[in-house]
């Protein structure tokens, strides 16, 4: 997901994340996972504010010095659930 810097104060990105999370829940998924670049400070802030937490890479991704990986557990799944 990328947006013009002119849209950085817009709620568009958050609304898109809201839609993706709702659709993932509707389809039965219990989490969202993503990767972004280490130089994407705005994206990293957005994901952290949205409740994503940093995680190590997992298959099919490999450790990459230029990437940051995130996960967000979606509603209705207890922390011990492997969703």
Image (cartoon, rainbow, N blue to C red):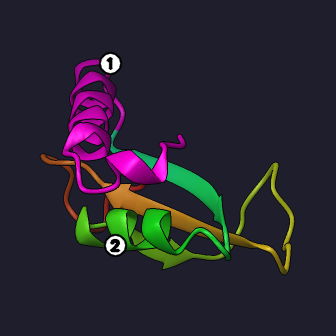
Tell me: 34 left or right of 47: right
**Label 1 crowd bin: few (<14), some (14–19), many (20+), radius 10 Å:** few
Mark 2 vs mark 1, foreground winner is: 2
Residue topped by disc 2: 48
Picture disc at residue 47? none
Q: Which residue is at 56% across, 52% downward? A: 34
Residue shown at 84% from the left, 73% from the top: 63
Magenta stretch, residue numbers: 1-29
Instruction: Describe residue 70's horizontal placement relative to residue 7 as left or right.
Output: right
Residue identified by numbered label 1: 27
Question: Does the stretch in magenta take in 40?
Answer: no
Q: Is residue 63 above or below residue 74?
A: below
In the rendered view, does 7 fall on the left or right side of 41? left
Q: Nearer the viewer, residue 62 or 78?
A: 62
Image height of 15 relative to 44, above or below = above
Q: Residue furthest front?
A: 6
SS category of the residue bearing label 1: loop
């Amino acid at each position: 997901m990328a947006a013009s810097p002119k849209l950085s104060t817009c709620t568009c990105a958050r609304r898109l994340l809201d839609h993706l999370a709702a659709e993932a829940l509707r389809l039965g998924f219990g989490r969202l996972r993503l990767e972004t670049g280490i130089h994407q400070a705005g994206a990293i802030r957005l994901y952290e504010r949205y409740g994503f937490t940093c995680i190590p890479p997992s298959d099919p991704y490999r450790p990459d010095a230029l990437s940051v990986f995130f996960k967000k557990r979606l509603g209705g799944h207890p922390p011990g659930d492997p969703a």
